[in-house]
Amino acid sequence: MPSVALPVIRHYIAAPPTREKLDYADLAILDFSKIGTPEGHAELSVQLRDAMTTNGFFYIVNHGLTQAENDRMFDITDVALCGVPEEEKRNYLANISDGSNEGYKLRAYLHIDGGVRDQFEYYNINEDISCKQHPKAVRPLLPEVAEFAKFNHYRILHPLMRLFALGLELPEDTFVNMHNFEAVGESYVRMMKYYPRSADDEVNAKQVWLKGHTDIGTVTILWSQPVTSLQVLMPDGQWRYVRHIDNALVVNSGDAMEFLSGGFYKPTVHRVVQPPQDQRGYNRLSVIFFAMTDDNVKLVPRAESPVLQNLKHGVQRRWADDADAPTMEAWRKGVTSTYGLVELKKKEDGTEENIVNGIAVKYYS
């Protein structure tokens, strides 16, 4: 991260951690200070594989950024969301209906439930910051965003992709080679803020701020923040909160990793709900890195994996034939252009779904 002559911006004051007793998920913690040794690499590979075949969420600590550098990214995020006039934001809207998430999504764009519209906004910046133009207040901060994106890509994503490959007994760079920084794709830094809702909206939407879903890409890297709203659907069918850990990363895999691993690494269902009582007056500011493969990667299982070949149930596919598998571009555009914008079909098990590229995309209340 840049360390000299940084632009002076307002410091964002985060909410204090909740003091309420909540039912928290028991998630693995990967210590990335071990990533540089063969022994540590092997240990982390086993730890990640266990996490991904149980609940699919885990933390990363000792990743290489200081708390001050972490705080700076939240300050920048606050500028992008609160330091840009609404009329200027409209000049940089994401073309969501055409399947692109780069740019702003303003509040009340998506339907959540019970006639309730969303109360969150975000600004997505492609890891290649030159892909789009940016609002005036953000432009002086772009060098820092670019460094942050590179950090996530090379220092977090690529090591994780090597660990995922080792878990399948594949060559270490199998998945790394699908995530090229210079390639055409839509991995991006998301700057996001949830705002408190009215009492009526909370009732009508059953306290759900974002329905349970899986992410589109390979992995999602969330920089932990204190407003406790994120829940994960655990193997026992219960929703449990994700605990905040200072300067930690909260990581989960997505649809693309499920497709590439033949169902071995299942994407984790998660949602955002109303915070506990002692945090309900606060906004929820988030910094997230969404990782996807290069657009031209066809999301077919790596069937050459010895692990997949030895599974009793065999390789699992969400389509009839590998020829029907989508590319990363087709999958991200199909899901992005329909999420929260089309009527969902209700299923007997209480879930809802939409069909994208012939594949059922499920949502959970």
Image (cartoon, grey):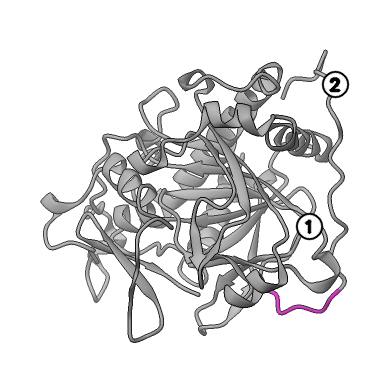
Q: Classify 10 Å Cα crowding around label 2: few (below 14), some (14-19), many (20 and above).
A: few
Residue type, label 1: Pro
Q: Position of residue 101 (x, y in %)?
A: 45, 39
Residue 31 against residue 47 in the figure, above or below: above
Q: Along the line of sight, which residue is nearer the eye, 329 or 59?
A: 329
Residue located at (35% from left, 47% from top): 337
What whole-number distance in Å separates the C-alpha atoms at marks 2 and 1?
Answer: 24 Å
Q: Secondary structure at mark 2?
A: loop
Which residue position holds label 2?
Answer: 8
Q: Position of residue 177 (x, y in %)?
A: 36, 34
Residue located at (41% from left, 36% from top): 95
Which residue position holds label 1?
Answer: 226
> Which residues are the magenta region?
20-26
Q: Position of residue 83 (x, y in %)?
A: 74, 31
Mark 2 vs mark 1: which is more N-terminal? 2
Question: Which label sits in the foreground, 2 or 1?
Answer: 2
Residue located at (31% from left, 64% from top): 354
